[in-house]
Amino acid sequence: MYRQIADALKAAIDAGQYGPGDRLPGENPLAAEHGVAVMTARQALRTLAAEGVAESRKGAGFFVLAPFTPIRRRGVARLAREQWSSGASIFSADDSRDLTVESRVLGPVTPPDEIADVLQLDADGRAFGRYRRHIVEDRPVLVSTSYLPLALVEGTAMAEADPGPGGIYARLADLGFAPARFREEIQVRMPSADERAALNLSGGTPVIKVCRTAYTDEGRVVEVNEMTLDSQAYVLEYDFDA
Amino acid sequence: MYRQIADALKAAIDAGQYGPGDRLPGENPLAAEHGVAVMTARQALRTLAAEGVAESRKGAGFFVLAPFTPIRRRGVARLAREQWSSGASIFSADDSRDLTVESRVLGPVTPPDEIADVLQLDADGRAFGRYRRHIVEDRPVLVSTSYLPLALVEGTAMAEADPGPGGIYARLADLGFAPARFREEIQVRMPSADERAALNLSGGTPVIKVCRTAYTDEGRVVEVNEMTLDSQAYVLEYDFDA
DNA sequence: GAGTGGTCTAGACCACTCC
DNA sequence: GAGTGGTCTAGACCACTCT
């Protein structure tokens, strides 16, 4: 029964009867219209939210979500040496759409244990942190925290709000610590409450966790970047040779 | 209120009071114990299922799920030429655990449009299909459908149930169509009903869709493999140079 | 046959949003 | 102030599982 109502609403949306941002009928009208209990109408609306078709706003109603063309994130090409050594940002390889990056310097922080291990931190266990938030078409699509060895960063442009053309990797290269190899680890799960808030996620949208480690030629770890992506907003692409 | 009950159950599970496979208290006992309505106790159990802590079995109850160490899928290394040219299976690079692969030859099939485009199929739009299902510790973790150009496959070992040591890629190499480059595209979403059944997924577990395209040196597409992964069962790893 | 989860009914209160 | 979703109550029937 609730599936029928949900499907009927979905069909109406696909038919253009409700456009992006439009409010769907509330529980009471829906229940009356279909001759069911309010709780049943609720479940239909909730189902649409879980499927990512609509979102609920407390005290306001259920609203049709705008379709979003996923960002194609070219995992290998975006991190090629030519990309950052030419002064371009990494993200500019991803998508032709405008991207806003909010960047906030955290300064010395204590990273999670797994990351502290990879970074080979000394006794005090602190690293230089930077928080970023990517926004495309007014939609937050990624948040990340980047960790670098404190000793490498202090007193350099990397500690500035804007590290300059080519970003952190170009600055590392200036100091003789150019990243030569990367490892990206991808995991998927449902978001925590914090992540749901930071990415403005609604309903049953999973997040993609990407953890990137940057190594120099000699195998020294110079950065660990832990990213949280809105899974609906991204297609990850990796190109490589056999 | 339902959060409190859910958290209490979660704590009891973490404390070892309920082990993997154990049945949790039903709605009625739970409601009585906490002095709430049955519907509220239900919501608590449902929350645990959505979080992937427990699963519901119709007519039987809610059961604690076994923790599962994710498979580390080494995206680049597993597809290296040395891997398949040495006669090893691709999967053997992933994990030390035993992996069962069910393989079923589908024969000539009509692939989805996107895949037909990539494969550059001729007028009839048919390709050689093979279905696979990966099982680790009795748990299905991946299903896939692989498509190859019909002309390349017919009358060769690739059309057999067992294509021999090194698998399809080794056979393609025998014929002078060795894969030289790969592209993997990753997307994440909630599973369809079919996918939920095939992977025995419970509650709010997302799936990872990996679509791999294999190219020869000359850029000819020789395989498209569309995979569906249980997101809780995998960590995807990609290593590459700057 | 007893117990279970899946679904449905018919109410209710609250905090919140919008007008 | 009216309407909304979030949550809760107190019942009910059904198909299913397990013993």
Image (cartoon, coloured by chain):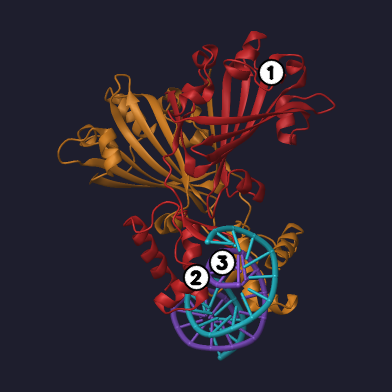
Chain colours: A orange, B red, C purple, D cyan
Q: CA distance from mark 1 to mark 3?
A: 50 Å
Residue A229, horizontal then vertical, whole percent = 47, 46
Mark 2 / mark 1, whichever is N-terminal: 2
Q: Amino acid at mark 3?
A: Ser
Q: Element at badge 3?
A: strand
| Quadrant housing residue B36 | bottom left
Subunit that carries the residue with mark 1: B
Q: Element at badge 2?
A: helix
Image quarter in which the N terminus of chain A is found: bottom right
| Residue to which mark 2 is pinned | B27
Query: In the depicted view, which residue is nearer to us: A35 or B13?
Result: B13
Residue A115, horizontal then vertical, whole percent = 30, 39
Tags 1 and 3 both on a single chain: no
| Residue to which mark 1 is pinned | B158
Q: Are marks 2 and 3 in contact (CB under 8 Å)?
A: no
Q: CA distance from mark 2 to mark 3?
A: 27 Å
